[in-house]
Image (tube, grey):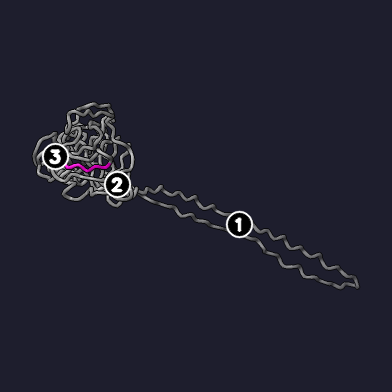
C-alpha cells in the first residue's frame, strides 16, 4: 500500500454547447427591355424590324450552408447512493502521534465526521481513538500503526467522503475481511466503521476452557456468507470454549461479534469478529445489532 502526501478533491460539472445553423442565398433575374419594332416607309421601301434581343438566362446560386458545430458534453459524475460527501476538514490537522491535547480533540472530531467511531472527543488518545485511527488507516490504505503521523494527518484533513462499506441497501452488519473493517449499515447508508480482527486462517488446537478434558481444534476461519444474529449475551464477559469474550452477538454457530481487549491490525481470532470492548458497549447501548440482524461476511 502506497502512502500519498496529497489530498483528494472532488468535482462534478456539466456543460454543453448549442449548435447554430445559418443559410444564405442570392439570385439574379434582371432582364433588359425589348427593343421596340420601327417601320419606316421611304419610297415604298420597307425596312424590317430589328431582331429582339433575348433575355439573359436566370442564374440562381445554390445557398451555402454553414454547418452547425458539434456539441461536446462534459462527462457527468454520479456518486453511488451509499457515498456521503462531507468535504475537507475545516481545521488542518497535525501529526499528534499518540499524544493528548487540543490537537487530539480535532482529530477525534474529524474521525467522527468521517464515520469512524472513537467515543467522546475528550482529547485523550485512548484505546478507542487508537482503534479509530487504525480503522481509518486501513480504509485509506496507509500503514496501520494507530499513530497519527504526517501522512495520516494529511489524509484526515483532505479526504472528502464518509466511510462506507459495499452495501448500498438494507440494514445489516458488513464485515470486510480484506480491509479488516466492520460497518454498521442502516437503510443502505453506512453510519459507523470499526476496526476489527477476524479469523487468522490458521489451524488451531487447544483445551476447551469450560471443560479441560476436551480438545478443540479446527481452522480459524470467519466464514464468508450472509448470516444473521441468532443469540447474544448482554452483560460482561462470558466463558467460551476457547476463552472469554465480551457481550457477544452470535451469528454462525459459536462464531460471534464480540468485544476484546486486543484488536490488532491483522486477522488474529479463532473465527470470531473482534471489536474493542468500548465499541461493543456502544453497539449494545444504541441497539445497533438486535437479534435477527443480517451479517454479511466477505472479502
The numbered disc on residue 237 is 3
The residue carrying pointer 1 sits among few (fewer than 14), some (14 to 19) or many (20 or more) residues within 10 Å by Cα, namely: few
Q: Earlier in the sequence, mark 2 or mark 3?
A: 3
Image position, residue 299 (x, y; %): 32, 36
Say what secondary structure mark 2 lies in.
strand
Q: Is residue 261 visible?
A: yes
* Nearer to us in this view, 13 or 150: 150
CB within 8 Å, label 1 to label 2: no
Say what secondary structure mark 1 lies in.
loop
- Image position of 80 (left or right of 21): left
Question: Which residues lie in the magenta part?
Answer: 246-251
Q: Is residue 149 visible?
A: no
- Image position of 146 (left or right of 100): right
Q: Earlier in the sequence, mark 1 or mark 3?
A: 1
Q: Residue furthest front?
A: 213
The residue located at (21%, 27%) in the rendering is: 206
Please name the residue that numbered disc 2 is placed on.
Answer: 294
The residues tagged by marks 1 and 3 sit, at their Cα atoms, a distance apart of 91 Å
Image position, residue 12 (x, y; %): 34, 48
* Nearer to us in this view, 220 or 298: 220
Image position, residue 123 (x, y; %): 10, 42
The residue located at (32%, 37%) in the rendering is: 224
Image position, residue 143 (x, y; %): 23, 31
Q: Give the quadrant of residue 99.
A: top left
Amino acid at each position: 500500500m502506497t502512502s500519498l502526501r496529497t489530498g483528494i478533491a472532488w468535482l462534478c460539472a456539466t456543460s454543453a454547447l448549442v449548435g447554430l445553423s445559418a443559410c444564405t442565398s442570392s439570385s439574379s433575374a434582371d432582364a433588359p427591355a425589348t427593343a421596340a419594332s420601327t417601320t419606316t416607309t421611304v419610297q415604298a421601301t420597307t425596312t424590317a424590324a430589328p431582331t429582339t434581343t433575348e433575355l439573359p438566362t436566370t442564374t440562381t446560386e445554390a445557398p451555402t450552408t454553414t454547418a452547425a458545430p458539434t456539441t461536446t458534453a462534459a462527462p457527468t459524475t454520479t456518486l453511488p447512493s451509499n457515498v456521503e460527501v462531507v468535504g475537507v476538514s475545516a481545521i488542518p490537522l497535525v501529526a499528534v502521534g499518540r499524544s493528548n491535547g487540543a490537537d487530539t480533540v480535532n482529530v477525534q472530531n474529524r474521525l467522527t465526521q468521517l464515520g469512524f467511531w472513537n467515543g467522546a472527543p475528550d482529547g485523550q488518545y485512548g484505546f478507542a481513538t487508537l482503534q479509530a485511527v487504525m480503522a481509518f488507516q486501513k480504509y485509506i490504505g496507509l500503514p496501520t500503526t494507530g499513530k497519527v503521523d504526517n501522512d495520516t494527518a494529511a489524509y484526515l484533513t483532505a479526504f472528502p467522503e464518509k466511510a462506507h462499506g459495499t452495501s448500498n441497501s438494507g440494514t445489516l452488519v458488513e464485515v470486510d475481511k480484506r480491509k479488516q473493517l466492520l460497518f454498521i449499515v442502516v437503510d443502505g447508508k453506512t453510519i459507523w466503521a470499526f476496526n476489527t480482527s477476524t479469523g487468522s486462517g490458521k489451524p488451531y488446537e487447544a483445551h476447551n476452557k469450560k471443560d479441560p478434558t476436551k480438545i478443540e481444534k479446527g481452522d480459524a476461519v470467519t466464514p464468508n456468507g450472509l448470516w444473521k444474529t441468532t443469540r447474544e449475551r448482554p452483560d460482561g464477559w462470558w466463558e467460551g470454549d476457547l476463552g472469554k469474550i465480551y457481550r457477544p452477538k452470535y451469528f454462525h454457530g459459536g462464531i460471534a461479534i464480540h468485544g476484546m481487549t486486543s484488536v490488532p491490525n491483522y486477522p488474529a481470532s479463532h473465527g470470531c469478529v473482534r471489536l474493542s470492548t468500548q465499541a461493543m458497549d456502544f453497539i449494545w447501548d444504541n441497539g445497533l445489532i438486535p437479534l435477527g440482524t443480517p451479517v454479511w461476511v466477505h472479502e
